[in-house]
Image: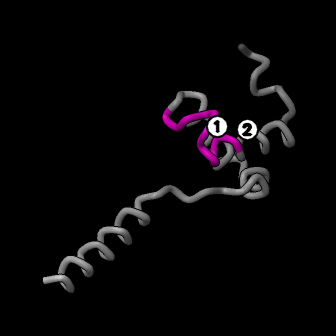
């Protein structure tokens, strides 16, 4: 019985960690404009948490490095 519970717990932990979204680096966002725009919109629309999600932080830094503050100039 203990083995079944242990196997279930291990399996559950693998399934839960597999659900996490990939964390992209600033470099990856800088190199892929489509990916950068996709995540910029997700963060801007608050699908992700702009101030705490690592992808939001990285995409904002990449956007500033590549485009400066032009993304926010229309507001």
- Say whether residue 38 is visible: no
Residue 60 marker:
2
> In the picture provided, is 4 more to the left or to the right than 35?
left
Spatial CA distance of label 2 from label 1 is: 7 Å
Label 2 vs 1, first from the N-terminus: 1
Image colouring: one colour
CB within 8 Å, label 2 to label 1 = yes
Q: Looking at the image, which residue is at 79% across and 18% down?
A: 73
Quarter that holds the C terminus = top right
Mark 1 neighbour class, 10 Å CA radius: few under 14, some 14 to 19, many 20 or more: many
Could you tell me which secondary element the residue under label 2 belongs to? helix
Residue in front for this viewpoint, 73 or 18: 18
From this view, report whether residue 70 is shown above or below residue 32: above
- The part of the image, by quadrant, that contains residue 37 is top right
Q: Nearer the viewer, mark 2 or mark 1?
A: 2
User: What secondary structure prevails in the magenta region?
Assistant: loop
Residue furthest to the top in view is 75
Residues in magenta, as a range: 47-57
Which residue is depicted at the point 36% across and 68% down? 13
In the figure, is residue 22 to the left or right of 13?
A: right
Q: Is 51 in the magenta?
A: yes
The quadrant the N terminus occupies is: bottom left
In the image, is residue 27 above or below residue 61?
below
Query: Residue sitting at 61 percent across and 34 percent down?
Result: 50
Which disc, if any, is residue 40?
A: 1
Q: Residue furthest left?
A: 1
Counting from the top left corner in percent of width and height, residue 30 is at 78, 51
Q: State left or right for residue 16 relative to residue 25.
A: left
- The residue nearer to you, when weighing 45 against 3, is 3
Q: Position of residue 69 (x, y in %)?
A: 83, 27
Q: Quadrant of residue 14?
A: bottom left
């Amino acid at each position: 019985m203990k083995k079944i519970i242990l196997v279930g717990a291990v399996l559950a932990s693998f399934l839960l960690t597999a659900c996490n979204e990939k964390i992209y680096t600033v470099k990856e966002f800088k190199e892929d404009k489509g990916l950068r725009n996709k995540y910029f919109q997700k963060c801007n629309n608050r699908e992700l948490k702009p101030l705490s999600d690592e992808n939001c932080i990285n995409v904002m830094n990449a956007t500033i490095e590549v485009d400066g503050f032009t993304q926010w100039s229309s507001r």
